[in-house]
Image (spheres, grey):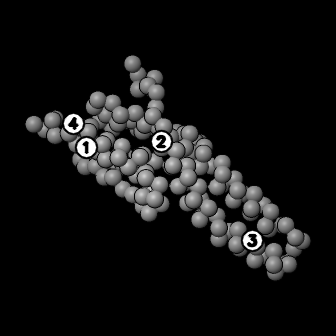
Amino acid sequence: MDDTDTELTPLHPNHVKVTRIVAALFALPFVIGSIVLEVVDVLPFGVFVVPVFLLAAFLVIRVPLRRYHARGYDMGEDRLRVVRGILFRSDTVVPFGRIQHIDVNQGPLQRAYGIATLTVHTAGTHNASVHLPGLENSLAMDMREEIRAHIKRETL
């Protein structure tokens, strides 16, 4: 069976919530700036605030959901496959034998929502780190330990 035939495991649904919060924090200065430009009353009402608000709404509501559906992973017996991307698709397969170390990272928002990012570092310089965000924290820890155990078995 080919790697592209396997069903991908989706990320935790809380990943969408965290991504939306990050997008809202990114869009907030632009919305505030457009409101300030509206208050200055240089151009007719709505010229700044309406397009910026619509773009911000799209950025906060629709983009995180599309990114969520465009990501997935498959953990095999001897490799981790990570698929991501909306316009530019990336399908990365990391053999456990190439992994040098593994990190589980959580920012404050991720910690609040119980999710984490699994990062595997491989030998080499091109794509030497593969990030898998949006995993439930306990699952990320279990995956790290499973990969670590596999690496330990190979080196014995």
What is the C-alpha distance between the residues marked 2 and 4?
A: 23 Å
Q: Is residue 111 above or below residue 35?
A: above
* Amino acid on which disc 3 is placed: Ser
Of the image marks 3 and 1, the number of the one nearer the N terminus: 3
What is the C-alpha distance between the residues marked 4 and 3?
A: 53 Å
What is the C-alpha distance between the residues marked 2 and 1?
A: 19 Å
Instruction: Kindly report which numbered mark, 3 or 1, lies closer to the viewer in this rendering.
Output: 1
Foreground pick, 54 / 91:
54
Tell me the quarter of the image containing the N terminus.
top left
Residue located 38% across and 49% down the image: 137
Horizontal side of residue 19 vs 143, given as left or right: right
Horizontal side of residue 20 vs 53, given as left or right: left
- Element type where label 4 sits in the image: helix
Q: Which residue is mark 3?
A: 34
Q: Position of residue 99 (x, y in %)?
A: 26, 43
* Amino acid on which disc 4 is placed: His
Q: Which residue is mark 2?
A: 11
Q: Which residue is mark 1?
A: 145
Q: Which residue is mark 4?
A: 150
Instruction: Kindly report which numbered mark, 3 or 2, lies closer to the viewer in this rendering.
Output: 2
Of the image marks 4 and 3, the number of the one nearer the N terminus: 3
Q: Position of residue 29 (x, y in %)?
A: 65, 71
Q: Position of residue 11 (x, y in %)?
A: 47, 42
Foreground pick, 89 / 108:
108
What is the C-alpha distance between the residues marked 3 and 1?
A: 48 Å
Of the image marks 3 and 2, the number of the one nearer the N terminus: 2
Whether pointer 3 and pointer 2 mark residues with C-beta atoms closer than 8 Å, the reply is: no
Residue extending furthest toward the right: 44
